[in-house]
Image (tube, helix red, strand yellow):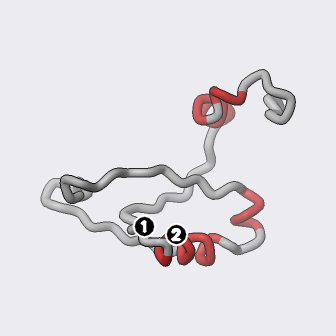
Amino acid sequence: MRCRVRLSQGGVAKLRRDSSLSLSILKPDCLARGLQDRVMSMMESSGLTIVYTERVMLSRMAIDSIYERCLGRDFYIQQW
């Protein structure tokens, strides 16, 4: 997995004033199929700059928090 981090002193990502941050989450099937480098390349070729990557296993509570607006909808499976 590639990791590009541009850090200022103190370990904080230095961004231009007109920059914004977005969170991208690659789902398990993407990782299982080995597509992470391809997805990241697509992001970069569209003009995005990847400043930090981390691979973590999210808890059920964290997933429900991220997808809170989907809770209770037919397509959202709340139990694994």
Left or right side of 51 for 77: right
* Rendered view: 72 above or below 23: above
Report which residue position mark 1 lands on: 48
Q: Give the distance between the C-alpha atoms of the residues marked 1 and 2, in whole angstroms.
A: 6 Å
Disc 2 secondary structure class: helix
Q: Residue furthest left?
A: 9
Left or right side of 24 for 10: left
Instruction: Say which quadrant the N terminus sits in.
Output: bottom right
Q: Residue at x 72, y 57 (%)?
A: 28
What x and y, as percent, mark residue 56?
A: 57, 52
Amino acid marked by disc 1 = Leu
Earlier residue among tags 1 and 2? 2
Q: Residue 73 is drawn in which quadrant?
A: top right
What x and y, as percent, mark residue 7?
A: 23, 63
Q: Residue furthest top?
A: 72
How many other residues sit within 10 Å of disc 1, few (<14), some (14-19) or many (≥20)? few
